Image (cartoon, rainbow, N blue to C red):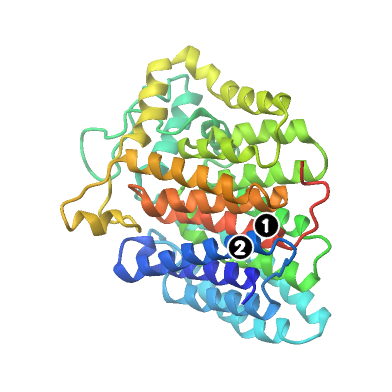
Amino acid sequence: MTTGSLLVGSYTLLAFAMFQHNAAYTPYGLACVCLSFLGVCIAGFWARKYPTRIAAGSDRLLTAAFIFFLVLSLFHPPGIYIGNNNYVLFVHLTTVLLALLAPIAFLTKRTTMTRSFFILAIVLAVTYRILMPIASPKPVIDVFADIQESVAHMLNGLDPYSTPVRDVYGSLTPVLQGYVYPPADLYLHTIAYVLFKDARYIYVFAELFVAWTIWSLTKGQSMRRRQLLTLIFLFHPRALFVLEQAWLDPLILLMFSVFLLLRQNGRERWSAAVYGYMLSLKQYLIFFVLHWFLLERRWTQLGIMIGTAILTAIPFLLISPHGLWENGILYNLQGSASADSLNFAPLLMQYGIELSSTVSLISGIAAGLLTFVIFRRLPPLRGYLFATTITTFAIFLFGARAYCNYYYLVSGLMVFLLALHATEETKITA
């Protein structure tokens, strides 16, 4: 088995685990996640031990993963708050069509047929995403309410970090006292809200841009492999569910994509700025700072990265420092373990052991340092991608909380690792 085959298998296992009960805890789902994590670690070990043996996953294996995703997605609706059954019917019928055509398209040598199928699949993937916010306009989840209302508050001249948000679960007392994410997210959500009245359309753009980035960064590989890598990202069996729930992890993948593209094109300073913006999207991304040094060690670039991250917060540090600190920073750092997290936390809770967010911090520090040491001798890009993927995976698996969107981020990093694992590192390395 090659390193690439292990990565394809790990990606597929993780997607399967996420599909079970929407990544809520089950012993079987946890076993799949553990096997997926083990597969990535072994792949990294092989890449380190045999650095000149760059073997990608076979097209047949990628085709099997893609078809498996298509078949798997037929067993559940694409979302859980969809009010229009015609949308579900449309997605399922067209998915059946794709599942029937995919073996013919990718297991034959007719490039015209493969190209036509790829175009059809891309059109459908775009259509699914554009229609999802329309089919599920008001998902009953606090994340969506917090984003929508906080953006509206800001546009109406109110402080989004100090203005309470209604409780969508029925309580008369607001649970969220303001926007619970850093300002970098708020700016991007505002763009989509102003244009479409639904902030989730920024995620639609983000996922399509990520797909285009995968396609662009694999230039030089076979056409069929480029197509399959793009499709296994777009047709991840829980991608539409993540979109419906308004989870912001696609924004992280968006900025990660822009960062990689800019480095490939020799725009190091701009890539450093985008990297800094990405770091300011969520608190646990702080561990990406350490891995930055696997790619770049110039202090000027580090200053640009850190400076950009700080700049995103300055407006609200001046306007609402207390609200920003309490809601935008601390809120998501103070949560304890959840009984439905797909990691070891629910298992330990059965024995009276409840993990705190400190465990996530310790897991991140340990995994970050260990992967930095292990992968620093690999070619820069390859070492960086292995280090960030394994560290992020470890934070969730061994930390206090791990939900569907958390593993969706890990899945995205794994696709980039798959896409760039066998690519010549020329412009993109430091």
Residue at image position (31%, 62%) is 25
**Mark closer to the chain start, 1 or 2:** 1
**Dot 2 corresponds to which residue?**
233
Q: Residue at x 76, y 73 (%)?
A: 224
**Amino acid found under the numbered disc labelled 2:** Phe
Element marked by disc 1? helix
- Percent coordinates x, y for residue 130 in the rendering: 59, 56
- In this picture, residue 315 sits left or right of residue 348: right
Q: Is residue 210 above or below residue 176?
A: below
x, y percentage for residue 70?
55, 75
Give the answer, above or below, for where 364 lies relative to 244: above
The residue sitting at the left extreme is 352
Residue 307 is left or right of residue 153, and the answer is right
Q: Residue furthest top?
A: 318
Quadrant housing residue 1? bottom right
Q: CA distance from mark 1 to mark 2?
A: 7 Å
Quarter of the image containing the C terminus? top right
For mark 1, what is the residue?
211
Q: Residues within 10 Å of mark 1 (few under 14, many from 20)?
A: many
Disc 1, disc 2: CB below 8 Å? yes
Q: Is residue 308 visible?
A: yes
Amino acid at circle 1: Ala
